[in-house]
Amino acid sequence: MWTSTSMGVPESVLLSVMGLSVVMVTLIILALVILVFAKVMGSSNAAAQSAPRPIPDPPGISDEVCSMILAVICEELHASPEEINVTSIKELK
């Protein structure tokens, strides 16, 4: 394409713009592919996550104690209560 040993300013600007456009188009395509994969993977998990399971009432532990335990777990894990599924509460001995 270039026959001389040096490149002028217009050619260098054109080459830079072409390089940046290739990078930007590649990033846009990658973002779209990630969105498509997120939609496909999210649709299979949406049915399982749409119906939250209730926390069973353990025998001998009041609702207030269960709420405090769940609050402590959420604080330690930096998560919301909807993200955590408590199946049982047992005292460790």
Image (cartoon, grey):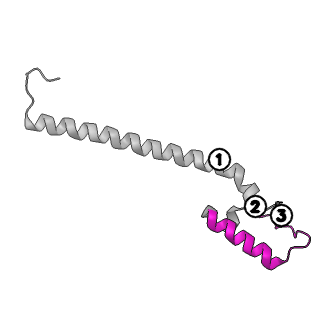
Q: Which residues are magenta?
A: 52-76
Q: Name the residue carrying label 1.
A: 41
In the rendering, which numbered label is found on residue 55?
Answer: none
Q: Quadrant of the N terminus?
A: top left
Give percent across and percent down for residue 25: 37, 42
Q: Of tags 1 and 3, which is closer to the observer?
A: 3
Q: Of tags 2 and 3, which is closer to the observer?
A: 3
Q: Name the residue carrying label 3.
A: 91
Q: Amino acid at mark 3?
A: Glu
Relative side of 12 to 67, left or right: left
Q: Quadrant of the C terminus?
A: bottom right
Relative side of 61 to 50, left or right: right
Q: Answer with the quarter of the image where residue 68 lies.
A: bottom right
Judge whether residue 66 is colored magenta: yes
Q: In this rendering, is residue 68 above or below 40?
A: below
Q: For the point 71% across and 49% down, which residue is it?
A: 44
User: Between disc 1 and disc 3, whose residue precedes?
Assistant: 1
User: Between disc 2 and disc 1, whose residue precedes?
Assistant: 1
Judge whether residue 53 is colored magenta: yes
**Label 2 CA crowd tier, 10 Å (few <14, some 14–19, many 20+):** few
Q: Using the numbered discs, state the Cα–Cα distance from disc 2 to disc 1 in whole angstroms.
A: 21 Å
Q: For the point 14% across and 23% down, which residue is it?
A: 2
Q: For the point 73% across and 69% down, which residue is it?
A: 70
In the rendering, which numbered label is found on residue 85?
Answer: 2
Give percent across and percent down for residue 87: 82, 60
Query: From this viewpoint, which residue is outermost toward the bottom?
Result: 64
User: Between disc 2 and disc 3, whose residue precedes?
Assistant: 2
